[in-house]
Each structure stands twice: as C-alpha cells, then as structure tokens.
Amino acid sequence: CDLRRPAIHRIFGLQDPPGLSDYLENGKDLSEFLIKTGHNKLTLLPAGKSPRNPLELLSSEKMKDMLKEVRERYSDRFVILDSPPPRLTAESNALARLVDGVVLVVKKGAAGRDVINDLVKSIGKEKLAGVVFNHFELPKISALGYGKYGKYGKYHGYYK
C-alpha cells in the first residue's frame, strides 16, 4: 500500500508489475494482480504504478471491498499491508481505520518517544498490535557475546 514509493516487489525480483493501484483504478478482477511467491501461503499484491491520488484510492469503497474479498479468499492467512511512513503521508492513517491491527515499525534513532506516542494516539491503542524496533544492535556486555546468554553459553552448538 505504499503507492508513492513502491518497493516490496523488488524483494521478489519483480520489475514494476501492475498491482493495487491498477486494480483500484481499472476495476479488473483481483486475481489478475495477485502473484504466487513460491513461499507456502505467501501471495503478493504489488503496489502497481504510482498514482496521482494515493489517499483517494486507499480510502475508497473499492479498497474496502478489496480488503473484504482478500479476507474471505485467504481466511487461513494473515493479510499484511505495507504502508508508507505515517508521519510523511496521510495514507497510513486511512489504512489504519480499515484494518484489525497495526504493527508500528520504528527505525532506531529516526523517531523520538514523543513522535511514537503521538503515532500510538493517532492509530489508537486498541489497534496497536505491536512495535518493532529495527536497525538496533544489542551491546556486547560479556566475554561470551551478547547479553548474559551470549551464544547460549555451553549450548551454543545446539542451533548449528
């Protein structure tokens, strides 16, 4: 759902495939835009081309209907929407109203406590499913490695 700067498709080695924006604008059958990834139970709906009206598309009735269809089609899976950064665009707030829960991803050093608190308030605590802090390194505090567990102490070979 990051229609301004789509990137997820590149992780899967795809070159600008049609996707969500094309579906929302043109009204073709959703199955024409879904891509099987080769990973069990992982289907991708790329963002598609960057439209001139992303907020309008993502807050449309067509988007609501698409989410209902996806929930029904994939009732045995989680439906995950990747959105643009919430402080930079309005689309994230519109999407938050359409979903059951939000996982907030925060890059270390990119947002202060006040910014995160404001985001939680705007999303609503009842919608917040969790927070992921990325680009974070644990300090090396023992001779064994990270934290008191190091490389699992005497069991470090267990996971090899």
Image (cartoon, grey):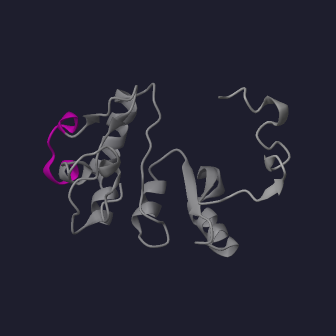
138 within the magenta span? no
Which residues, given as a range, are shown in magenta?
A: 23-32
Residue sitting at x 44%, y 43%: 80
Residue 105 lies left or right of residue 28; in this view the side is right
Q: Quadrant of residue 117?
A: bottom right
Q: Quadrant of residue 50?
A: bottom left
Q: x, y percentage for residue 53?
A: 25, 67
Q: x, y percentage for residue 101?
A: 55, 47
Residue 92 lies left or right of residue 106; in this view the side is left
Residue sitting at x 63%, y 68%: 116
Q: Is residue 46 above or below residue 4?
A: above
Q: x, y percentage for residue 60?
A: 30, 55
Q: x, y percentage for residue 130?
A: 63, 50
Location of the C terminus by quadrant is top right
Residue sitting at x 28%, y 45%: 13
Q: Is residue 58 above or below residue 29?
A: below
Question: Which is the main secondary structure of the residues drawn in magenta?
Answer: helix
